[in-house]
Amino acid sequence: MKKIENIINRIRINKGDNEISEFQKNMSLRDDIGFDSLDLAELTVLIEDEYNIDIFESGIVSTLEEIHERLLIDGGNN
């Protein structure tokens, strides 16, 4: 899950937010991480580039744990 955390922090830094030093698997992408729809779109693209998987293809993903589960289901290695 470290790669996902790095991707999330890269997006946060690019928009002027601080890095998150400690991630929890139940963190909400919107409420806890502070992503809006454009950030989520960027996250989707970066994860697809890294893992060749569209994490939102099968429905909404709201937490870090759901991203991790989607990657495991779709065969990604994190």
Image (spheres, rainbow, N blue to C red):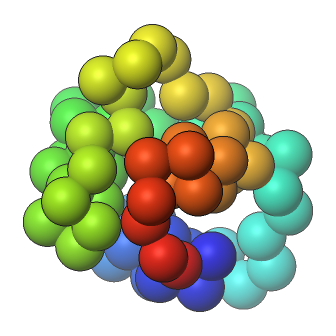
The total number of labels drawn is 0
Q: Position of residue 58 (x, y in %)?
A: 40, 19
Q: Which of the image's four quarters has the N terminus? A: bottom right
- Residue at x-position 72% and y-position 84%: 21
Q: Position of residue 38 (x, y in %)?
A: 22, 33
Report if residue 77 is visible in the image: yes
Comparing 34 with 47, the one in front is 47
- Position of 66 relative to 37 (above/below): below
Report if residue 13 is visible in the image: no
Relative to 37, is 77 on the left or the right? right
Residue 49 position by quadrant: bottom left
Relative to 46, is 58 on the left or the right? right
Relative to 73, is 39 on the left or the right? left
- Position of 31 relative to 2 (above/below): above
Comparing 70 with 34, the one in front is 70
Residue 25 position by quadrant: bottom right
- Residue at x-position 45% and y-position 14%: 59
- Residue at x-position 43% and y-position 65%: 76
- Position of 13 relative to 68 (above/below): below
Comparing 15 with 55, the one in front is 55
Residue 54 position by quadrant: top left
Q: Position of residue 33 (x, y in %)?
A: 61, 49
- Residue at x-position 58% and y-position 57%: 72
Q: Position of residue 5 (x, y in %)?
A: 55, 75
